[in-house]
Image: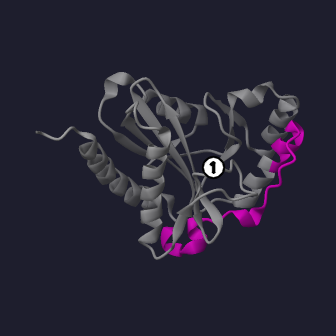
């Protein structure tokens, strides 16, 4: 597991993985310091400067990413998984989403917890490709497709101080004029489910081993079969 003292450097390292010359697939696990990742489009909205100043005071400086999505908190206890795969243009992005979510669901299922994929109203950066346990968001996923490769990303709530992060999201939303409610009870952490999974380093080690094996099988299934 890598730790980045500079969250912008973490995002830059992800983008490097989209380089066409890299070939094959790769898996990385990383964490970074407290911060709030926002899409570039959000910087053009009214109230952004006020949101930026307020989050800086709260200890969640804003970091801008090139892709879309919503506000995503980062910090200790929040684990990021980055997987790159060759892009197959005749396949829609939902196929890779389904693969990544399936891997995360199987990991959680191995500890006896039933996980599904779907939206959780009241969660941060909500979407149809959340990983959900007990009706609450455990992880969010995103995808960015390059010329030859796709980047799959998951943000997993392992053992963070969740309430300060959610308060920072609420603060930013208020400045940006976003009335959507954010409910603490819409989220769950791995440490709440079991103390066994309260250490991000352990979770990272087990997940990367699973994902590396999964990537190998995934790529093998894509290869043309000999006639």
Instruction: Determine the residue positioned at 61% across, 27% down.
Output: 66
**In the image, residue 24 lies at what x, y percent?**
29, 35
Mark 1 neighbour class, 10 Å CA radius: few under 14, some 14 to 19, many 20 or more: some
Q: Nearer the viewer, residue 45 or 218?
A: 218
Q: Is residue 59 left or right of residue 99?
A: right
Q: How many marks?
A: 1
Q: Is residue 220 left or right of residue 134?
A: left
Residue occupying the point 78% across, 61% down: 183
Q: How is the image coloured?
A: one colour
Furthest-left residue in this view? 227
Quadrant placement of the C terminus: top left
Residue stretch in magenta: 170-197
Front residue of 7/106: it is: 106
Residue 2 rendering spot, x and y as whole percentages: 46, 45
Determine if the magenta segment contains residue 15. no
The residue lying at 60 percent from left, 53 percent from top is 76
x, y (%) of residue 119? 65, 56
Q: Is residue 9 placed above or below 199 in the rendered structure? A: above
Q: Is residue 65 above or below residue 166?
A: above
* Residue 156 against residue 52 in the figure, above or below: below
Residue 170 in the image: state x and y as whole percent: 82, 49
Q: Dot 1 corresponds to which residue?
A: 75
Classified by dominant secondary structure, the portion drawn in magenta counts as: helix
Observer able to see residue 6: no
Q: Residue at x 53, y 74 (%)?
A: 195
Residue 20 visible, this orientation: yes
């Amino acid at each position: 597991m890598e730790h980045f003292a500079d969250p912008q450097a973490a995002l830059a390292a992800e983008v490097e993985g989209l380089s066409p010359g890299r070939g094959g697939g790769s898996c990385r696990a990383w964490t970074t310091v407290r911060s709030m990742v926002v899409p570039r489009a959000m910087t053009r909205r009214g109230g952004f400067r006020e949101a930026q100043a307020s989050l800086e005071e709260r200890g969640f400086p804003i970091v801008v990413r090139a892709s879309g999505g919503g506000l995503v908190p980062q910090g200790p206890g929040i684990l990021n998984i980055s997987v790159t795969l060759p892009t197959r243009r005749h396949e829609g992005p939902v196929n890779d989403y389904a693969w990544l979510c399936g891997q995360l669901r199987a990991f959680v299922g191995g500890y006896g917890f039933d996980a599904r994929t779907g939206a959780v109203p009241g969660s941060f950066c909500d979407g149809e490709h959340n990983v959900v346990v007990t009706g609450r968001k455990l992880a969010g996923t995103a995808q960015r497709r390059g010329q030859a490769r796709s980047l799959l990303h998951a943000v997993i709530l392992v053992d963070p101080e969740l309430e300060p992060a959610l308060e920072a999201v609420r603060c930013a939303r208020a400045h940006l004029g976003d009335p959507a409610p954010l409910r603490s009870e819409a989220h769950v952490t791995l440490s709440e489910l079991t103390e066994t999974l309260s250490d991000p380093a352990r979770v990272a080690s087990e997940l990367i081993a699973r994902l590396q094996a999964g990537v190998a099988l995934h790529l093998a299934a894509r290869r043309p079969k000999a006639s």
